Amino acid sequence: MSDSPVAAEPPNTLTDSRELLLGYLDYYRSAVLRKLDGMPEDDLRASRLPSGWTPLALLKHLAFVERRWLRWGFAAEQMDDVWDDQGPGEGPWRVRPDESAERIKRLFMDECDRSRAIVAQADLEDRARSGGGFNPPDEHPALIWILFHLLQEYARHAGHLDVVRELVDGVAGE
């Protein structure tokens, strides 16, 4: 999973709320990919934790988090496939044997690109469109709330990957 895009932490001089929020979101997207770089496919598919999730399944989960929250939820795109990271009887996160690490990485990067395009066309105060994936359907969270939700999810999962990576090969997080 090499050649991952690298986003630096936003500078401490940045004061624009939108740039700061989007900068940190890209920083954590990049951090997740960085933490997976150099791991052999066997380790990407192996769980080190009692819950059973794997690093590759976490990356797929984050791709579908992007899809659910921004494409399906905020932009109200009608989609059939918003839960492919979860399978009945297979635990909360799954990767099929025919899904390579590169395929999952490409899915993740494509979903992040689509999310960026949606956000670029909206104001932070804009509300989710009707017909989106929020439950109850009359909920219309603001884009800024959705982005902060995504940011906390990325920060939490990047920390999970720090622990797993250290257990796999001793590489400590950055």
Image (tube, helix red, strand yellow):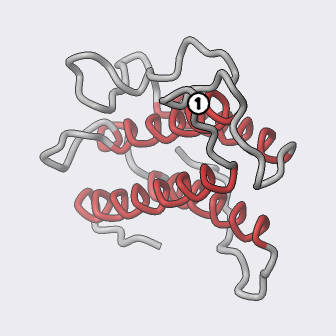
Q: Quadrant of residue 130?
A: top right
In this image, 119 relative to 40: left or right? right
Secondary element at image label 1: loop
Question: Residue 39 or 77: which is nearer the viewer?
Answer: 77
Which residue is located at x 33 percent, y 58 percent? 160
The residue sitting at the top extreme is 80
Which residue is located at x 46 percent, y 34 percent? 60
Which residue is located at x 55 percent, y 58 percent? 151
Which residue is located at x 36 percent, y 72 percent? 172
User: In this picture, is 151 found above or below 67?
Assistant: below
In this image, 19 relative to 3: left or right? right
Residue topped by disc 1: 138
The residue sitting at the right extreme is 121
Q: Amino acid at mark 1?
A: Asp
Residue 156 locus on image (x, y percent): 40, 60
Question: Residue 155 or 102: which is nearer the viewer?
Answer: 155
